[in-house]
């Protein structure tokens, strides 16, 4: 049996501002933006050349979902963005105004820095060491 994660839902406050952040600040690609009703859209974004998994940007509906925007994991890192060139992406993101909550450091597994998305969710930017 072969399985993989196709999409990860990320609760956002606004579709268009989220699309703009991911495509302009992180250089992700907009894979799909399909209206499903007057208020709901199927919006997928992913890193360039991503092979399987993408983010499903899901607009918060109601107070409970809105309370989760920006803090879906209670302050822990939510997602891990693997890169093949840490310094290139780190400098690019800094130049585009992406806020880094923790500066780069070298760990046993590779180089990592923690950045925030537009709502404050924490991400690791990580270049793993070759084993």
Image (cartoon, rainbow, N blue to C red):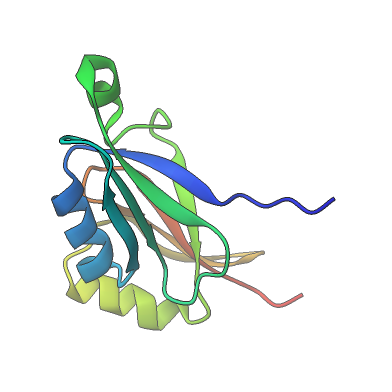
What's the residue at 53%, 80% (across, down)? Answer: 84
Which of the two residues, 62 or 115, is positioned nearer the viewer here? 62
Which of the two residues, 66 or 107, is positioned nearer the viewer here? 66
Which of the two residues, 55 or 38, is positioned nearer the viewer here? 38
Judged from this view, the residue extending furthest toward the right is: 1
Tally of numbered discs: 0
Image position of 131 with respect to 62: above or below: below
The quadrant in which the C terminus is found is bottom right
Image position of 52 with respect to 42: above or below: below
What's the residue at 53%, 57% (across, down)? Answer: 53
Is residue 62 rendered to the left or right of residue 108? Answer: left
What's the residue at 16%, 42% (across, down)? Answer: 14
The x and y percentages for residue 25 are 23, 67
The x and y percentages for residue 73 are 43, 32
The x and y percentages for residue 125 are 44, 63
Image position of 89 with respect to 99: above or below: below
Is residue 121 rendered to the left or right of residue 13? Answer: right
What's the residue at 19%, 76% (across, down)? Answer: 95
The x and y percentages for residue 52 are 57, 62
Is residue 95 rendered to the left or right of residue 4? Answer: left
């Amino acid at each position: 049996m072969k399985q993989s994660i196709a999409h990860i839902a990320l609760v956002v406050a606004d579709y268009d501002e989220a699309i703009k952040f991911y495509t302009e600040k992180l250089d992700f690609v907009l894979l799909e933006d399909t209206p499903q009703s007057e208020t709901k859209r199927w919006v997928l974004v992913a890193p360039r050349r991503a092979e399987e998994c993408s983010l499903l940007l899901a607009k918060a509906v109601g107070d409970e979902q809105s309370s989760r925007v920006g803090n879906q994991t209670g302050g822990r890192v939510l997602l891990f963005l693997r890169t093949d060139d840490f310094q290139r992406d780190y400098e690019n993101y800094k130049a585009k105004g992406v806020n880094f909550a923790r500066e780069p450091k070298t760990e046993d597994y590779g180089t990592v820095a923690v950045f925030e998305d537009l709502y404050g969710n924490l991400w690791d930017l990580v270049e793993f060491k070759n084993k």
